[in-house]
Amino acid sequence: MPAHLLTGATSGMGKAIWNRFRAQGKHVIPVVRSEAQAREIGADEFVVCDLSDLGQVEKVFSEFDQPLKSLVYCAGLSLPRSVFQVTAEEMSRITNVNALSP
């Protein structure tokens, strides 16, 4: 059965979609940063990937071999403070997650 691959399933809108899809009996595979996060939401099947690391994203998704019905992208990061005070590393991480990851 094709799955729905869901990022951001551990909080906010992504968690609401996770709960709704599961209640509807859909095959949902969350993308999480750690196995502990997957356990917190009760996922038996999951993909561990830090979406801010584009090398990791490319590797994980190139090896993913299950048929997909959809990719539901709910992952996102916000600025921890004024844009003028954010470091280049923080901005890179935010951009990678919010704009460049699948």
Image (cartoon, rainbow, N blue to C red):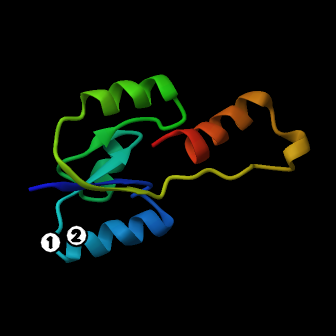
Looking at the rendered structure, the kind of residue marked 1 is: Gly
Q: Which residue is at the far right?
A: 84
Q: Position of residue 20 (x, y in %)?
A: 30, 75
Cα–Cα span, label 2 and label 1: 5 Å
Query: Image quadrant for the N terminus?
Result: bottom left
Residue on which disc 1 sits: 25
Residue depicted at 24% across the width and 34% down the height: 64
Is 91 placed left or right of 38 in the picture?
A: right
Of 98 and 13, the residue lying toward us = 98
Residue 28 in which image quadrant? bottom left
Give the number of callouts: 2
Is 5 placed left or right of 49 in the picture?
A: left
Query: Image quadrant for the C terminus?
Result: top left
Of 13 and 67, the residue lying toward us = 67
Looking at the rendered structure, the kind of residue marked 2 is: Arg
Residue 6 in which image quadrant? bottom left
